[in-house]
């Protein structure tokens, strides 16, 4: 296996594992916590925000970005006043992101400059940055579930 293939394989596996953990959190969220105002950012909104950026940062450039078909303007921003997405919609978006990650990681040009002016990273570092963002929010949502129910979300080592 070449170094480039090893990098792609590792990122694909870890994106899938991160998405597995986010999916477990989405599925475990109690119904009454899904759109609860007990936290500044609603559970569903953090999940949507996370998936939006998983999708975005897997494109070569910001201009190449094609939002998920269910996207609503400004829903990615963690601001109040956005119509809630259903659990089923978030799970549909998550499934879309799984397939998108597999395709984009396999095709991503690893040796080019960033196509995101605010992220002056190589594509490999952008993959790591994006993965870190995914896991940050998956952990945040898992902790909410632990606080609300006493049960956490299990760790996934590889996807």
Image (cartoon, rainbow, N blue to C red):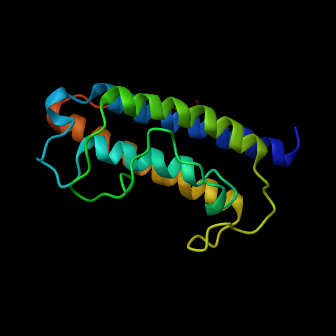
Q: Residue at x 23, y 52 (%)?
A: 41
Pick the quarter of the image with the N terminus: top right
Q: Report whether residue 78 is seen.
A: yes
Residue 111 spot, x, y in % from top left: 81, 62
Residue 74 spot, x, y in % from top left: 37, 57
* Vertical position of residue 93 compared to residue 45: above or below: above
Q: Residue at x 47, y 54 (%)?
A: 133
Residue 6 spot, x, y in % from top left: 78, 42
Residue 39 lies left or right of residue 28; in this view the side is: left
Residue 101 spot, x, y in % from top left: 63, 40
Q: Classify residue 79 by image quadrant.
A: bottom left
Q: Is residue 56 or residue 127 the one in the foreground?
A: 56
Residue 123 lies left or right of residue 15; in this view the side is: right
Q: Which residue is drawn at 18% across and 27% down?
A: 31
* Vertical position of residue 37 compared to residue 99: above or below: below
* Vertical position of residue 37 compared to residue 32: above or below: below
Q: Is residue 132 or residue 67 the one in the foreground?
A: 67
Pick the quarter of the image with the C terminus: top right
Residue 82 lies left or right of residue 32; in this view the side is: right
- As drawn, the residue found furthest toward the left would be 38
Q: Report whether residue 154 is seen.
A: no
């Amino acid at each position: 296996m070449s170094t480039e293939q090893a990098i792609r394989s590792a990122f694909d596996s870890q994106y899938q594992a991160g998405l597995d953990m986010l999916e477990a959190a989405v599925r475990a969220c109690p119904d009454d916590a899904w759109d609860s105002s007990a936290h500044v950012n609603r559970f569903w909104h953090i999940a949507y925000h996370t998936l939006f950026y998983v999708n975005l940062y897997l494109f070569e450039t910001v201009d190449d970005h094609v939002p998920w078909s269910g996207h609503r303007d400004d829903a990615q921003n963690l601001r109040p006043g956005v119509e809630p997405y259903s659990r089923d919609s978030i799970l549909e978006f998550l499934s879309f992101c799984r397939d998108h990650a597999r395709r984009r990681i396999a095709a991503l040009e690893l040796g080019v400059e960033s196509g995101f002016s605010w992220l002056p990273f190589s594509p490999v570092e952008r993959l790591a940055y994006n993965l870190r963002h995914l896991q940050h929010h998956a952990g945040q949502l898992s902790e909410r579930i632990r606080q609300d129910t006493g049960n956490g979300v299990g760790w996934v080592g590889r996807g």
